[in-house]
Amino acid sequence: MSKSKQANESVDLKDRLLTGGLTEQEVSKFLETIKERVGSPRVIVFMGKTGVGKSEACNALFGGGKEFKTNAVCSETSKLQLETIPGLPLTLVDVPGVGEPDMKRNEQWQTLYQSVLTKGVSVTNSDGKTTYLPVDVIVWLVKADDRSLQVDAEFYRNVFKKYCPPEMMGRVVYAISMADKIDPIRGHGGWQEDSSKPGAEQEKNLDIKKREVGRIFEKPAHQIVAFSASTSFNIDQLLEQVVDTLPREAIPLVVAEARKNQAKTKKRIINKKVEKKEDNALWDVAEDVADFIAGDKGKKVVKVIRTVCSRAIEFFKGWWS
């Protein structure tokens, strides 16, 4: 969105809010608070064995054509090395260690996971003080052609469930990466190069894999998404699962970064369901904020604007353009 267009829509939205009965002070506080609520720093943690494709998944969702390397845990210091995506307070974190030899003999690993799951990821501010950013969602990847998931099962049972708070257990996406690598890769029933989709036999094997992953992680098979970052197969479904799992106020910012990537790569990342959830999240937050600032009057005003001022949603989205 151009700055001139955003400015025009800002004026239009403010006029409607004033006409609806809010004072200028209330309108300013309303917009500032929304921006603060949905613009808070967000953290997505990617988990899985080495080579499962965490960096590739990050690039497919948020890379925008650039090679984004997920931040890794330094095994010597057991501290997270973080890097914020330019332009947005969104941090993607690679937490290796699932299945690594050090897991069984190095207590630092368990201390690290306990800290990430209960406190979040540590960040050192410019003043030298350490603060923690809470984790918004965890994406746990399993390779489609991984024939043994015993390591994942043991780690989930002995470490993850032990340290993960109950409220965080509901914010985990379990996904099958490299769907194009499951047997049969080529030939009858194999990967369909023309449509970038699995063949009939691969579909059957992916369904089997989903049920297997679901049993390990105690999730229904239909909630397990299989995708391929290299071919962009089901990347929109992966994002949809992430959005479904995110806290409401985190949705707009995460979708905004995916939208930038979609514009640069010209690949479908955001589907209609995600767009609708993004819009609903913004409006829900707007109504909550209006109610907080101006009580029933504010909430009623925003409900009216929601039905007559569809361009307001574009104004909100324009904050991250």
Image (cartoon, rainbow, N blue to C red):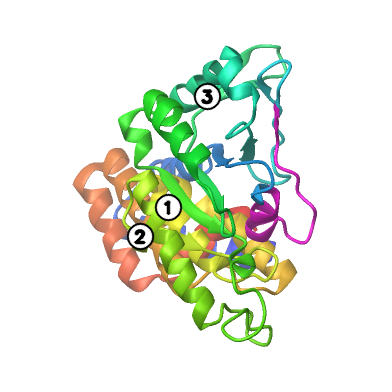
Question: In what element is the residue under mark 3?
Answer: helix
Residue beneath the point at 51% across and 45% down: 140
**Residue toward you, 172 or 253:** 172
What is the magenta range?
55-73
Q: Give the left or right position of residue 10, taking residue 259 as reference.
A: left
Which of the 4 image quadrants contains residue 90?
Answer: top right
Instruction: Give the CA separation, mark 2 to mark 1.
Output: 8 Å
Which residue in the structure is indicated by mark 1? 213
Does the segment drawn in magenta span residue 59?
yes
Q: Which residue carries the number 2 mark?
A: 221
Using the image, determine if residue 220 lies above or below residue 92: below
* Identity, as a three-letter code, of the amino acid under mark 3: Tyr
Q: Which residue is mark 3?
A: 113
Residue 29 in sight = yes
Is 178 on the left-hand or right-hand side of 219? right
> Mark 2–mark 1 contact, CB under 8 Å?
yes
- Of the numbered discs 2 and 3, the one sitting upstream in the chain is 3
Residue 27 visible? The answer is no
